[in-house]
Amino acid sequence: MPKKGQRLPWRVSFTWAGSDIKGATAHDSEQRAVQAALDMFSTARQRESELEITIGNRDTGETYEMTATHAIVKEVKASIERARSYAVNGADAGVIAELVAETEALLKEVKGTGSMKLRSDLRDELTDALKATAEPTTEEGAREVAVAPAAAVEGVVMTTKEAKLLDEGVQAAREAVALGTKMADFAKTVSRVQLAMRKKILHDGLPDLLLISYKGREESGRIYKLVAQELDPADVTKRDSLKALMRGVQNQNAEVLVSYLRGLDADKEAGLKEVEELYPDAAKAYLKAAAKATEEKPASLTEAVYTLYAKKGIELPRKGRAELARETRAAAKALASGEDSKLTAAQRLTNYHDSTIADLTKAETYVERLTTAAQKRKAKAELEAIVAKANEVLAKLS
């Protein structure tokens, strides 16, 4: 976890092709810089934009270029692993064929020197993954449950776009339950679909990004209801898989939302269009700030949206669970090794605070899994002890 006042040596410098938009983001490690670059390329591809990125270290002078190929290869590798999982678990042939088609479409985007060999090698990996077929299943076991299109849900009127989103979410949830593996991949897909749904539902005049409204919760939960209707009441394994998916989506929601919000600044032109459409007051604030912006203090679409929600009393997350967990581990390591010995008392207190909040956020996941009254009583007593200690520290500030 970057400490307060810590110098961030790694820089991701980017330029959007066809425009004068340039920028840079700072990171405390090469790993995080690379991940940030890959995320930006993914955003660029979704928006059909071209991007040039250079990663550099100000301390060592090391620099190297990142290309769109890096991001594409990463996605292809993930698709290959999904294909292997599908094959091993005897997924429906249509599902596998759809994944293969998506992977082929990605492979066609691989360009540049050595692209022919790279595409060939990746196709060979895909072929090998598809050969990892499990023992043949019975016709009953391989049958895909037929369901009505989401647009035909009784009593619900939807636009074509809304129905397409619901169908996409239902299909991903259905695959997750059927396979029972790689739940994190499916959870992220469902979470992204739900975010797209939430952007169309208003709460207090703004897109309901945090599922505060009843309608928002109802629409997001519709995916699970449709899949649950397909399941045999006696099939405990698949019903448990559906519950696991729901927990996984809940865990991914902050990750997906934070990535979306940060992405608004990744492509300023496309981001501005999004903000003007969904958050017009934030767009006005951004344009006003942009007129006074400098290279050291650039205007931020992301921050404009955060500020807009904050004015409504809504605190949007700035970090996902995985990022908070990484920071917790890094902070614990730094505190144990004495690496933060040169920090001021205020900076050290902030680091302890961030580490504690991250730990409690992680603990929340396990609290939700407690099933017996005894377990809940024990957990409650432990958490009350933490609250009591926090109050002791708080009292010293008065």
Image (tube, helix red, strand yellow):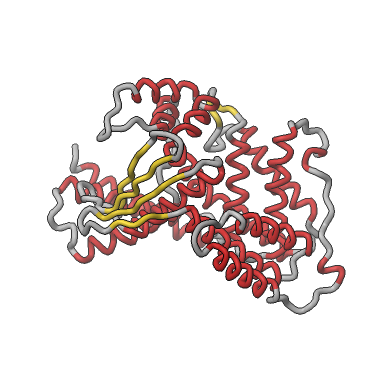
- Report whether residue 137 is seen: yes
Residue at left 61%, top 31%? 200
Residue extending furthest bottom? 135
Residue at left 42%, top 51%? 37
Residue 145: which quarter of the image? bottom right
Name the side, left or right, on which 221 lies relative to 289: right
Give coordinates of residue 359: x percent, y percent: 37, 56
- The image shows a total of numbered marks equal to 0
Residue at left 56%, top 27%? 203
Name the side, left or right, on which 231 lies relative to 79: right
Near-viewer residue (35 or 61): 61
Residue 193: which quarter of the image? top right
Near-viewer residue (141 or 295): 295
Image: 49 above or below 101? above
Residue at left 47%, top 32%? 269
> Which part of the image, by quadrant, shows the N terminus?
bottom left
Give coordinates of residue 7: x percent, y percent: 21, 50
Give coordinates of residue 126: x percent, y percent: 64, 69
Name the side, left or right, on which 348 lies relative to 309: left
> Which part of the image, by quadrant, shows the C terminus?
top left
Give coordinates of residue 183: x percent, y percent: 60, 61
- Report whether residue 81 is seen: no
Image: 50 above or below 332? above
